[in-house]
Amino acid sequence: MQEPSVPIEERGQRAGVPGYPGPFAVGRYAAKLRDRVREFAPVCVIGEVTGSRIGRGPNVYFELRDGDGALPCAMWRTDFDKLGLSEEEFRDGVEVVAAGSCDYYPGSASASPKFAFRVQDMRLAGEGDLLARLARLRRQLGSEGLFEPQKALARPRLPRRIGVVTAEGSAARRDFLAGLERRSWRGTIVWGYAPVQDRRAAGAIAAAIRELAAVGQVDTIVVTRGGGSIADLWAFCDETLCRTVALTPVPVISAVGHDVDRTLIDDVAAVCCSTPTHAAETAVGIDCSLASDRLASAAAHLDTRARAAVVSRARDLARTSRAPRDHLDRHRVKLHQFTREMRASARRGRATRAEYQRRIAASVIERKLEAAGAATDREAAKLGGRAAFLERAESSLLEREAAALAARATALGSHDPERALDRGYALLLDGEGEPLGGVDAVRKARRFDIRVSDGTLPAQVRESGGADER
Amino acid sequence: MSAEPITYERAVERLEEIIRRLDSNQAGLRETLDLCREGKGLIEFAAGELDAVGKGLEELRLDELIARLEGAGAAAE
């Protein structure tokens, strides 16, 4: 270490000690000492925490010890809070790895000097233990099925409102907005600002998520922060926070740390992203500008399709409607041709048939005439025979009838009363010329005629008392 | 389409189905006109969704949103 440039004795104030430079003003020497101490390279040291004092002051003080010695340590309160270590985690006896460099407070007239190892970052030395705790918690939440509910939620590709939980003014916020801009998304963002790296972080993040979900106005929630050590990101492994996320009815996208960091919230969230930008692109699943262009193209395509379909069908219909008419025309021509041919054929047919029939008829008539002539001849012959027979029969019959008549005349003549009159008999006839057959008939007639062979005499009954009848 | 609430994704998915069907040239005239009518409705819906996220980025703090909702609720009462 260099001594102060102007020893006091050289200014003639006091004598020093032989063999030693100086005397130097202690304040200046202390300041030089501070500067010299600060030149020590920053290192990590490991040891057990002892005498930790987390008060309200700007510094947190503690000592690190091991079997060979101890180092007084101081850490700015703001840096300590960023670690997110709870009082249970940062307690006497735990082993920590502290990163920092030597520092010396030179004191003042009223303040004591103090050497301290100025800790700028720190993690629990048993990070293996921390990771083991994380693994246990992961197994437990997994066994309870808490990794699944978020993944079962329907996540809109085009949310109107996105809730974002991050630190206000953080790089993650800026990166997330840049990601949204790349998607040309200009909807509504609801910021749920919360600390993301101290003892209060987990509770504040969980509260923000609960409230964002409760207002019912956001379609997706994004929880994001930049990278860091596992200690930095420990708030996102908080059991309560992870249970809150798992049971949130709105899909949660986590983007905590970088690719290599795997916090517990990544397991329970609907989607785990590597960066805030990636989270933005996941929350808005489409490029809005591109989607608008595609939509316009689809609209034009539909319009073209509809018009083409109508025009095409109209052409088909026109063609189809012409087809029957063309078909009919073709058939009409054919029919006309057939008709002409049929008429000609019919005329030819009729002439042929008439000639044929005429020939047939002539032949038939001729044959009929011949047959009729023959039949007439036969019938004439038969009639001649029959006439002769009849003539013979007639003459025979006449002869027989004449003989019979003569016989009958003879018989009749034998019974003729006239012949009796010739023999002297008389016939009494009434006024009507009817014969009177007895006395009673004569008395009854009273007047009567007496016919004799040569004439008739009138007569009457003459009644006399007791006279005989005559 | 099914009875489930329409979303942008479902609308775009159905629109792509419709365009595939139309491009196949297997749809008759009536089906083509019906599909075009349905497609235009879906396009209007999807365009509305895109418009809703294209007018301009609005940023709200959670407490502002809650206050706005509470104000709207009080006004409704």
Image: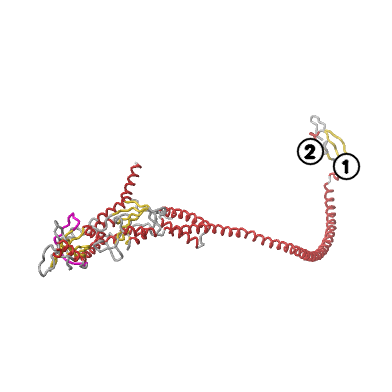
Residues at discs 2 and 1 both on one chain: yes
The type of residue carrying mark 1 is Ser
> Label 1 lies in what chain?
A
Residue A383, can we see it?
yes
Residue A139 position, x and y percent, is 24, 63
Magenta portion: prevailing SS class: strand
Which segment is the magenta one? A42-59
> Label 2 lies in what chain?
A
Residue B41 position, x and y percent, is 46, 53
Tell me if A277 is positioned left or right of A292 in this view: left
- Which residue carries the number 2 mark? A438
Please tell me which of labels 2 and 1 falls first in the chain.
2
Residue A209, can we see it?
no
Tell me if A361 is positioned left or right of B37 in this view: right
Quarter of the image where one finds residue A141: bottom left
Q: Is residue A373 magenta?
A: no
- Which residue carries the number 1 mark? A453
Residue A229 position, x and y percent, is 25, 64
Is disc 2 placed on a helix, strand or loop?
loop
